[in-house]
């Protein structure tokens, strides 16, 4: 093999170094941590930590933060040498750290009790897909713990690195930021931890801390700002929201011949329906949205949509607990204003973690004096006892109940061209336990369902790779790495059973998985659950259906030309 | 003894060492994990181990094999989104030469089959070129996905506003084939 | 920290800890005629016990004082929802909605290390079929270590009670089940050594583990290994004077401390290391013993949609009200036919 002569070498781009093949087959770019070496291991930041393109999201524009009064808005970029931090940034972080230790038992406890047994180490999808040891959950947490020890424990103050403590430096801050945005808060590690240490808790606290310095990312900060002012992440104004839904009505009419007439902001409705705005504005979520419309129409449900509470998702959840509360408040406020009896929620992952584990705690007092009561299905009379306090029902709970009571006319053969597998969303799985309802629905609306192997589904499900606000375009490499374990399991059922549809109940999944599939398993397409329900549903007065909601021909029913 | 027989004889050793060459491009702390046999818990390591072994076998088969691009594709698809420069991502292919020379160097000299070895080396160079093509195609795919994502986000809005122009269904793009289909690489002759 | 530095530090610390009582109890009297048995037999154990109990209480109280703002259990099974969806024992334990379920989950977690047990490994068998292989060595070593530790502690009650509680002889009987030798060989002592050795080797040989390990991980392993080692030495090799030792230990627990003659230096080393362990305990990761009970992802039930969980510091926040929203978009909403609360402002209103 000829080498490129030294003098021919063009100046390499910053992150690359040209090497001879001999060098390439030795260790590449990663310093080995030899048993006898004098390296400081993971505590060293530079040069081991280098913020790389494709692995992080763009910095938040100042106006986003200004809209919601977040501190230190400014123009900056993670690739810059100078992050333009406030002069007292260290104090801000340490103050914030102390404050949160006192407010969250989870944070305090998880800083203290880890024994570094390593049970979590190979459970993180980002570690599995990147082999970057700093993506091991235990180490991601140690990045914060090392600072905790230095400033908040006696041993750390006295012994320093011997006690696993290190100074808070700019490099440490960069490292924090880089790796805190390589965690999707999916909680898979916490399933395996003998003490239930939940990296999501640590990541959330870490993000809150970095956000104190204005180190937000735009993919989270923009939806937050939009949602605050317009009611949804996309920044869609009320009239456009209505237009969009009406546009769906046209498409539904084209396919089924039935015209529907949903209502908006209607007072006195029985049920308020809230779904992530991704379902209204992003394919393939839009087809799921059409599914909701068709379901409600067919049942004659007394339901209204809201343009004010037009967002089920909550990117505040990825910002800070206060921001989560501010955005979530709209649900109860709108339910109270409209005088509905209960709230129905669409298919979404983190939205449901917020509703199940946070909403009542945060905002139930807003609902005081409202007409909200324990949800009862008006069609089947089923009391949703598990939502007694929060008064919000998941649409798969609602639909599974309908199917169980034979209230839907279904023709699963309309989905016969589909071989379906189901992706459990992290949040509905590990923050709720919603496993059987969606599977029950799938099995009733299609004839070919194949679960992925155990260990990749249910409570051990793998993340799509783009959760917790990391589904931006600029960090595509990160998403693909993180999505590898999921794609790999889909590939297996694709090869074994010919699976061609990946069903999910999460708006972020519907945005992230199509790209993941396109890259790793291009033969598999992504669908929301209620798109399949709608396709299988026999509507009152429908015309002969030849295509599904996507305009794709139904098997055996192709239009004869 | 012919080169092929030698290569067959030392198959497991060479495959293992070539595999190690690939694994050594990952951080040392993670290499033990990557060796763990678990197709779902460790897809990366599994893909590499399976791919390297199969590529080696196919390579010995001699005939032009359709499977080589497929296995390379599996490996490169992951490496194309990991922390590698292009040269680092494909460099492991040349490692096979080094591994074989180390394992069989003296035998090759002894048996006087250096010509056969030169031809085989050529094939390895060919592998490297193929690998580079696949790597580039994967990178291209990533960029396409990035662009398409943006397009997809705005397309429906444009359509709603009546601004999007829909091409007729039977319209064909002139000569657009620049895509990886089912793990196969377009071979432009 | 790298592994070798960690090992040197921890190993050095242990050697020093062994050297201190050795020098003080064995060398000093021989060379200078100073006797310090009272220090190592009485003062230090008392101090260690005080630090142990006060420290643990301090830490636990500190944790317990920390509020739990949100109900964040990790749900590891189907939720309780519709009546016909299976919610059996497994679900009640892995995704509890009742206190009983939570207690069950905690029992499984604390006594059986349920979460560690989850680890499995898949392989392709013949014909591409999936085989599940156990990947439970960590779980096994952890279980063996912790239970042996418990057995050893209970066996040691022999030295601190008179008469012994009824269960001590039973435990001794079971523990010494294989009576090949005299004195009876207790398996727990050797099993704990084996488990600790596994846990140590794991840290040293697995590069992942080596990378995450700190001196604070090696130190307790070495410490407990040395304690077990000195104990085994005293029992089987350099026979200790059990009667005198019991006199000392009974003196300690009855608060009438005495230092009997004729206790070997090995015992003082053993006792000193145990004291160190006690004193070190509240300030180390060993506090996971108490922490696991407080872990919010395990000790809370998944019932936050059924009963409201109260956040003691639930902060008041500024929200964008519907009125403000309508003010922003009123004209457009009216134009689109969306209902509004207030009609569009008439020109006259503006004056």
Image (cartoon, coloured by chain):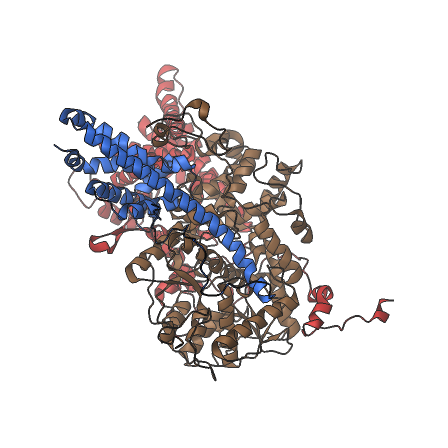
Among the chains pictured, the one given blue colouring is B
Measuring from the top left, give residue C303's x and y in whole percent.
48, 65
Chain coloured brown in this rendering: A
Q: Is residue C209 visible?
A: no
Task: Looking at the picture, tell me which residue is in the foreground, C248 or C143.
Answer: C143
Quarter of the rendering containing residue C193? top left
Question: Which quadrant of the rendered structure holds the C terminus of chain A?
Answer: bottom left
Residue C350 in the image: state x and y as whole percent: 84, 67
Quadrant in which residue C195 is drawn = top left
Q: Nearer the viewer, residue B133 or A444?
A: B133
Identity of the residue furthest to the top in this view? C31
Residue at the location (41% across, 23% down)? A5
Furthest residue in direction left, as rendered = B1
Q: Quadrant of the N terminus of chain A?
A: top left
Say left or right for B103 vs A206. left
The image shows residue C66 at horizontal and vertical percentages of 55, 50
| Residue located farthest toward the right when viewing the structure as drawn | C351
Q: Is residue A36 left or right of residue A40?
A: left
Q: Residue at x 41, y 41 (%)?
A: A116
Q: Which picture quadrant has residue C265?
A: top left
Is residue A250 visible to the viewer in this orientation of the structure?
yes
Residue C140 percent location from the top left of the image: 29, 47
The hue used for chain C is red
C335 left or right of A474? right
Give the mark count: 0
């Amino acid at each position: 093999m000829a080498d490129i002569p030294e003098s021919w070498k063009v100046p390499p781009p910053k992150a690359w170094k040209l090497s001879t093949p001999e060098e390439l087959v030795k260790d590449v770019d990663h310093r080995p941590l030899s048993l006898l070496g004098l390296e400081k291991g993971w505590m060293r930041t530079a040069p081991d930590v280098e913020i790389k393109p494709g692995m992080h999201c763009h910095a938040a524009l100042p106006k986003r933060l200004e809209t919601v009064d977040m501190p230190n808005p400014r123009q900056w970029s993670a690739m810059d040498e100078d992050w333009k931090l406030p002069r007292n940034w260290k104090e801000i972080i340490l103050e914030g750290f102390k404050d949160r230790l006192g407010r969250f038992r989870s944070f305090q406890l998880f800083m203290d009790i880890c024994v570094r047994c390593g049970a979590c180490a190979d459970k993180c999808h980002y570690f599995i897909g990147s082999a970057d040891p700093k993506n091991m959950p235990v180490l991601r947490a140690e990045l914060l713990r090392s600072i905790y020890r230095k400033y908040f424990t006696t041993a750390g103050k006295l012994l320093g690195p011997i006690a696993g403590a290190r100074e808070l430096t700019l490099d440490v801050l960069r490292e924090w930021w880089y790796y805190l945005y390589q965690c999707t808060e999916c909680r898979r590690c916490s399933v395996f931890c003998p003490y239930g240490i939940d990296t999501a808790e640590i990541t959330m606290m870490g993000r809150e801390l970095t956000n104190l310095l204005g180190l937000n990312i735009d993919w989270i900060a923009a939806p937050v700002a939009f949602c605050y002012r317009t009611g949804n992440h996309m920044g869609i104004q009320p009239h456009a929201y209505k237009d969009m839904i009406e546009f769906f009505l046209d498409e539904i009419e084209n396919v089924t011949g039935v015209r529907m007439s949903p209502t908006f902001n209607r007072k006195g409705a029985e049920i308020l329906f809230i779904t992530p705005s991704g379902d209204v504005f992003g394919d393939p979520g839009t087809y799921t949205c059409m599914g909701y419309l068709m379901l409600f129409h067919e049942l004659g449900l007394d339901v209204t949509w809201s343009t004010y509470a037009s967002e089920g998702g909550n990117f505040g959840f990825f910002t800070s607990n206060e921001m989560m509360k501010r955005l979530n408040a709209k649900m109860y406020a709108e339910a109270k204003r409209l005088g509905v009896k209960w709230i129905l929620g669409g298919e979404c992952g983190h939205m449901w973690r917020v509703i199940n584990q946070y909403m009542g705690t945060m905002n139930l007092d807003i609902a005081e004096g409202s007409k909200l009561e324990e949800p009862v299905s008006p069609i089947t009379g089923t009391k949703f006892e598990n939502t007694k306090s929060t008064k919000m029902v998941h649409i798969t709970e609602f639909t599974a109940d309908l199917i169980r009571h034979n209230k839907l006319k279904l023709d699963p053969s309309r989905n016969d061209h589909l071989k379906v597998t189901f992706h459990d969303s992290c949040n509905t799985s590990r923050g709720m336990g919603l496993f059987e309802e969606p599977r029950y629905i799938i099995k009733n609306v299609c004839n070919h369902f194949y679960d992925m192997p155990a260990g990749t589904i249910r409570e051990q499900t793998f993340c799509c790779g783009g959760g917790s606000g990391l589904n931006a375009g600029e960090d595509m490499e990160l998403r693909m790495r993180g999505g590898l374990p999921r794609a790999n399991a889909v590939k297996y059922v694709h090869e074994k059973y010919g699976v061609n549809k990946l069903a999910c109940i999460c708006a972020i999944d519907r945005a992230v998985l199509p790209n993941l599939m396109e890259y790793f398993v291009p033969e598999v397409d992504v669908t929301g659950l209620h798109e399949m329900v709608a396709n299988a549903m026999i509507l009152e007065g429908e015309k002969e259906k030849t295509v599904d909601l996507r305009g794709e021909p139904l098997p055996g029913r192709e239009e004869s030309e | 003894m012919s080169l092929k027989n030698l290569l067959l004889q030392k198959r497991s050793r060479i495959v293992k060492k070539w595999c190690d060459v690939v694994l050594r491009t990952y951080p040392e702390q993670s290499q033990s994990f990557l060796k763990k046999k678990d197709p779902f818990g460790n897809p990366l390591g599994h893909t590499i181990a399976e791919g390297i072994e199969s590529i080696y076998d196919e390579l010995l088969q001699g005939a032009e094999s359709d499977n080589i691009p497929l296995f390379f594709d599996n490996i490169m698809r992951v490496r194309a989104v990991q922390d590698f420069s292009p040269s680092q991502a494909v460099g492991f292919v040349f490692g096979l030469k080094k591994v074989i020379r180390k394992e069989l160097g003296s035998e090759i000299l002894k048996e006087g089959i250096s010509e056969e070895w030169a031809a085989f080396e050529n094939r390895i160079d060919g592998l490297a070129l193929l690998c580079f093509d696949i790597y580039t195609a994967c990178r291209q795919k990533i960029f396409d996905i990035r662009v398409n994502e943006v397009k997809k986000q705005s397309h429906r809005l444009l359509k709603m506003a009546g601004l999007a122009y829909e091409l007729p269904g039977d319209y064909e793009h002139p000569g657009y084939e620049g895509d990886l289909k089912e793990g196969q690489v377009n071979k432009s002759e | 920290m790298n592994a070798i530095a960690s090992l040197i530090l921890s190993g050095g610390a242990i050697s020093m800890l062994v050297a201190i009582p050795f020098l003080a109890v064995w060398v000093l009297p021989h060379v200078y005629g100073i006797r310090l048995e009272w220090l190592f037999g009485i003062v230090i154990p008392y101090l260690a016990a005080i630090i142990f109990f006060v420290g643990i209480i301090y830490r636990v109280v500190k944790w317990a004082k920390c509020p739990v703002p949100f109900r964040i259990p990790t749900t590891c099974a189907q939720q309780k929802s519709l009546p016909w969806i299976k919610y059996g024992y497994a679900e009640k334990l892995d995704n509890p909605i009742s206190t009983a379920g939570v207690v069950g989950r905690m029992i499984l977690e604390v006594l059986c290390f349920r979460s560690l047990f989850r680890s499995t490994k898949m392989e392709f068998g013949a014909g591409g079929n999936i085989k599940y292989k156990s990947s439970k060595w960590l779980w096994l070593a952890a279980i063996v270590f912790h239970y042996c530790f418990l057995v050893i502690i209970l066996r040691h009650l022999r030295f601190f009670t008179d008469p012994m509680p009824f269960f001590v002889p039973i435990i001794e009987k079971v523990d010494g089940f294989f009576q090949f030798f005299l004195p009876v060989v207790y398996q727990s002592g050797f099993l704990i050594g084996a488990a600790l050795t596994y846990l140590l080797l794991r840290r040293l040989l697995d590069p992942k583990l080596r990378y995450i390990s700190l001196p604070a991980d090696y130190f307790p392993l070495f410490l407990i290994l040395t304690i077990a080692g000195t104990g085994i030495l005293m029992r089987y090799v350099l026979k200790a004077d059990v009667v005198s030792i019991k006199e000392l230990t009974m003196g300690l627990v009855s608060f009438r401390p005495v230092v009997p003659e004729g206790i070997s230096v090995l015992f003082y080393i053993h006792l000193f290391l145990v004291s160190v362990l006690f004193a070190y305990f509240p300030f180390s990761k060993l506090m996971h013993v108490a922490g696991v009970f407080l872990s919010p992802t395990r000790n809370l039930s998944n019932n936050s949609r059924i009963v409201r969980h109260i956040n003691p510091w639930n902060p008041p926040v500024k929200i964008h009200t519907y009125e403000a929203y309508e003010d922003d978009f009123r004209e457009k909403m009216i134009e689109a036919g969306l209902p509004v609360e207030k009609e569009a402002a008439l020109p006259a209103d503006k004056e």
